Amino acid sequence: MSDARPFSHIAFFGMAKDCLPDAGFRALAKQLSAAAQAGPSPSLVVALASELLGRDGLRLPDWVDTDTRYLVVLDVPEQAVLRLASTLRLHKPDRRLQVCRDPSVVKRLVIALKRPAAWEGILDAYVLEDSLVVVLGDMSVWRFPVGRLPKVGRFEPAEVRRFEIDSAGSCLHWPDRDVHMGPSQMLQAVDPVYLAEVEIRRYEMENVSQALRHMRHDRRLKQTEIPGLSERHVRRLEREEIRLTVDAANKFARGLELTLSEFLDELSERITGLREDGMTKATPWLPRTTTPTSSPAIRSARSSNRTAAGSPEPR
């Protein structure tokens, strides 16, 4: 997953747009459909099951191929779901087809695709055995072991199933316990460094280079005093010659005696300062006494269970 637009083409077929609440959302859907782009990303078709399975069916666009994804609003009996795969000629329907009974899934998709990163929105979710299965805005499907999710892991099985999807798809809400959990927290449960990769990609190289240099200078460390990184590697990072990776960030954090999360918090604060003040030289940095104002992804991740583990569904 990345921050780039996840689909090369998007089509809202037939009555699918009628699932949107007003003309404003329908206009956004039209914009998304018109914004085709070349590239390796798959395409997406959004439609009602009744129209796909109807006697006349729907004529799909020429760009539909063997990698096209389908988000289908299920307005037919469950017994008819199996016909979708054959009607659409899907070889691997588990990777390409998502069905949802709730028509609001179309609204949540539009909102997710207008976010900076589509994965920050939730389209659908359900409990399967001992896992919480979540479909994100980029149509990726993730299985989160319930026992590893912060707070939710302590719920009774019946309580786990009693959740609501936020109307904008921002989070899942368990009203019985007043617990909210967004995609960032759930993804952190799957891969503790995943959000670090996302966070690092958000930064401009120049600001990262300056911030790293300031962080090292303020601790009076030499370029040779970052364990695991050669002096040349540190020098190239601080001269904007190479990009910061998660592996390098981990090593830099250890050299500064910080956890990766603390390192990214401080890096984010310094980069924000550089952007706002236009600094060109190092200035002393003092840690805040309150929660750092880093990105929402990192703030959410800090409150999650860092030892949690899970696995994404195949796409």
Image (spheres, helix red, strand yellow):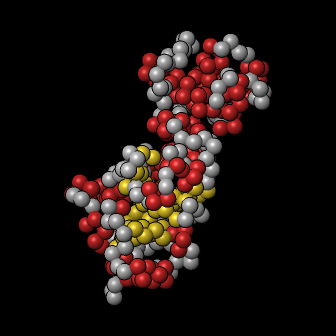
Q: Residue 45 in the image: x percent, y percent?
A: 41, 68
Position of 93 with respect to 163 (left or right) is right
Task: Look at the image and tell me in which quarter the C terminus lies.
Answer: bottom right
The quarter holding residue 245 reads top right
Residue 276 seen in the figure: yes
* Residue at the image position 55 percent from the left and 11 percent from the top: 284
Residue 190 at x, y percent in the picture: 59, 50
Name the residue rendered at 43%, 70% in the picture: 99
In the picture provided, is 15 more to the left or to the right than 98? Answer: left
120 vs 48: above or below: above
Which residue is more in the foreground, 120 or 192? Answer: 192
Considering only vertical position in the picture, is 201 above or below 89? above
For the point 61% across and 47% down, the residue is 308
Q: Residue furthest left?
A: 23
- Residue at 46% x, 56% y is 160
282 vs 149, nearest the viewer: 149
Please indicate, yes or no, whether residue 187 appears anywhere in the rendered image.
Answer: no
**Viewed as shown, does residue 95 lie left or right of 124?**
right
Q: Nearer the viewer, residue 101 or 281?
A: 101
User: How many labels sit on residues?
Assistant: 0
Q: Quadrant of residue 123?
A: bottom left
Judged from this view, the residue extending furthest toward the front is 156
Residue 5 position, x and y percent, is: 46, 52
